[in-house]
Every structure is written in structure tokens, then in C-alpha cells.
Amino acid sequence: MLADFYHLASSPLERVLPQICEKVLGGGDRLLVVAEPALLDQRDAQLWNYARDGFLPHGKGEGASPEGQQILLSSICEPLNAATHIALADGVWRDEALAFSRAFYFFDEERRDDARAAWRALADNDAVERRYWKQDEAGKWVQGP
């Protein structure tokens, strides 16, 4: 399983999450976006309004027919939409993400210590390939050491 750690130092999640969603969908995969219940409405609005000329169709976990959603928003790490990819979109690492083939873990400066703890906890897990991403001065995502 691939665990991508995205350090949100230059761009907010509102800009980064839709880009990741587009890439996952472009690859023919499904995505589960997980956040605390209080943040789900905010993530929902971000995906509907991120671009003037487009939107990312999605649904919420408690809505009707979650199995039909290519992108599903939920407060639990259960792939009701048969997702193989998960985005942890509230800065909280969840070990349930290890059941997916790829996890996107987004964190900001406030959650940096938590991200470091999660990174270290995964170090001895041979089934996990960890990657750390940060933005350069031009805003391009580059893989860090």
C-alpha cells in the first residue's frame, strides 16, 4: 500500500483535494474522502465549487446509494463505494487507511507533529511505502526526503 503524506504549507486543502480527486478519477479508481463529521459539509462544498467550469460529482456516506459514488465523503473509513483510495482530509491519520491500496494524508503546520508520529509508526511496516510531498517556491508538488 502506498501512503502519500501531503504537507499543506503553501496551498490550502480546498485547492489540493480537488486536484487529487481528479487524478484518482482519471486513473479509473474510486476515492473515499474521510473527515470529522463537522467538516464534511465544508469538504462537500469544496468539491462542488472548486472550479467555475466544472465540479466533482460525489456523495455523502449517509446519502442514498453510496455504492454508486466514485467519490464518497464519510466520517468513517469504510469503502461503501468500493474505493481503493482514501483521502484523510482533516489532518487525522487513521490506521484503517492501511486497508486501501493508496492513502492520501493531508496535514498542515498545526498537525505536523501528528503526521511525524504517523510517519514513524509506519516505518517498520513492510507492506507500506511512505512518500512525503511538499510544495516548492513555484507551488509544484515535489517528493521530499
Image (tube, rainbow, N blue to C red):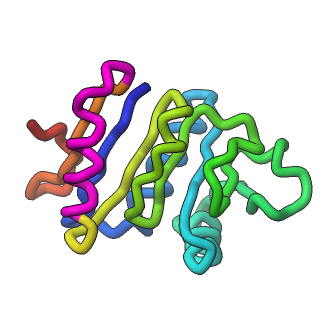
**The magenta stretch spans which residues?**
112-127
> In the rendered image, which quarter contains the N terminus?
top left
- Percent from the top left, x then y, of residue 124? 25, 27
Q: Is residue 18 above or below residue 36?
A: above
> In the rendered image, which quarter contains the C terminus?
top left
Q: Is residue 24 above or below residue 134?
A: above
Q: Residue at x 21, y 63 (%)?
A: 112
Residue 74, by quadrant, is bottom right
Q: How many marks?
A: 0
Residue farthest to the right, as pictured: 64
Predominant SS of the magenta segment:
helix
Does residue 143 appear to the left or right of 63 in the view shown? left
Does residue 88 appear to the left or right of 55 in the view shown? left
Q: Residue at x 89, y 51 (%)?
A: 65
- Percent from the top left, x then y, of residue 43? 57, 69
Residue 122, by quadrant, is top left
Q: Nearer the viewer, residue 51 or 117?
A: 117
Q: Is residue 70 above or below residue 130?
A: below
Asked whether 126 falls inside the magenta stretch, the response is: yes
Residue farthest to the top, as pictured: 126
Residue 49 seen: no
